[in-house]
Amino acid sequence: MKKTVSLIVPCFNEQESLPHFYRAVCEVAEGLSDYEFNMLFINDGSKDQTLAIMRSIAESDSRVRYISFSRNFGKEAAMYAGFCNAKGDYVAVMDADMQDPPSLLPEMLKILETGEYDSVATRRVTRDGEPPIRSFFARMFYKLINRISDADIVDGARDFRLMRKEMVDAIVAMCEYNRFSKGIFGWIGYKTYWLPFKNVERIAGETKWNFWGLLKYSIDGIINFSQAPLSIASMSGILLTMISFFAMLFVIVRKILFGDPVAGWASTVCIILFLGGLQLLCMGIIGQYLSKTYMEVKHRPHYIIAETNDQSADLIR
Ligand code: UDP
Ligand code: MG
């Protein structure tokens, strides 16, 4: 029997890119007659004609299913909806903007068929076409998160990876509300082959990311997969207590030997400001973890589906 390959495609305002993407996948699928392809489009609350395009593609092609959210829930939620509803033996997430080239699929399938790996992940080895400042911060982020967390995240890793069904089940079992898929993929383990490729610019439309969005995303990633900021906060507390103890000894000894304990107003103010700042920073760190915990314990659904042609999909999950 032919193996099935499900492609999950999160789309947010992708009316220009989606038809290109669909055509490209169809071409690749024609060349891979040993496999049955199907696509699951997720409309993540698009404001343009994305949903209409999905409907019309799904009408003309029975391999296509679509899920449309009641509003924009973010790419992470869209990917989760995809994983929950994907039915193939192999499953891949792909961006609709062609930045995850469908032409890599044959090679990825070949590698999985050797049986040695559970997933084939892609990573960009160049960052051409990306603003240099974004590349710089991205590199810093990967260095930092690999150092302080046990989620093994490769620099340039994309969400585009082809996985066996078992791996997808493990991802679905990680039902946390604050999702950071790059970390989740690393955390669940399994043997992964890293396939390098040259960065491709998006075919049409615009990226949904801006600097602040990416900064927030990276902080989320760190908070989700590392307790290091909390340890740093407590370590700096211990360190400062020790320093203040020695400073106290110094002041007492100086008073006994030379008198004058009062001089040093400026340094006192500096120290108070420094400590105040440090306390606020540490409270902020604790606050970040607390807010994540707050969202987690509320058990809100990850997404709400307003429309779909997939009868088996859970509408709220
Ligand atoms: N996306 C989404 N929901 C969002 C933002 C993005 O489903 O809230 C989709 C988007 O349609 C695209 C993919 O996620 O298919 C990647 O988005 P984008 O190209 O903007 O990110 P970049 O490639 O610049 O990292
Ligand atoms: Mg993109």
Image (cartoon, rainbow, N blue to C red):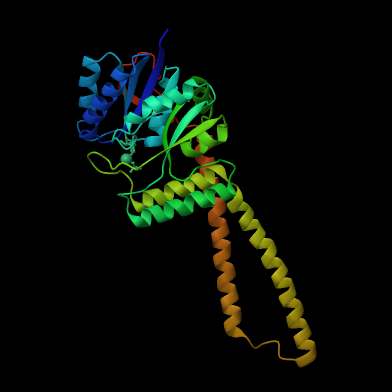
Counting the numbered discs, the total is 0
Left/right of residue 261 with respect to residue 224 in the rendered view: right
Q: Residue at x 21, y 33 (%)?
A: 15
The location of residue 168, given as percent across then percent down, is 49, 24
The location of residue 7, given as percent across then percent down, is 36, 24
The location of residue 25, given as percent across then percent down, is 29, 25
Q: Residue at x 41, y 24 (%)?
A: 316
The location of residue 256, given as percent across then percent down, is 80, 88
The quarter of the image that holds ligand 2 is top left
Quarter-wise, where is residue 89 in the image? top left
Give the camera-side residue of 259 and 142.
142
Question: Visible in this render: residue 69?
Answer: no
Question: Visible in this render: residue 244?
Answer: yes
Give the camera-side residue of 16 and 74.
16
Left/right of residue 182 with respect to residue 211 in the rendered view: right
Farthest-out residue, top: 1
What quarter of the picture does the C terminus occupy? Answer: top left
What quarter of the picture does the N terminus occupy? Answer: top left
Left/right of residue 43 with respect to residue 144 in the rendered view: left
Give the camera-side residue of 92 and 50.
92
Q: Is residue 249 above or below residue 55?
A: below
Q: Residue at x 54, y 61 (%)?
A: 280
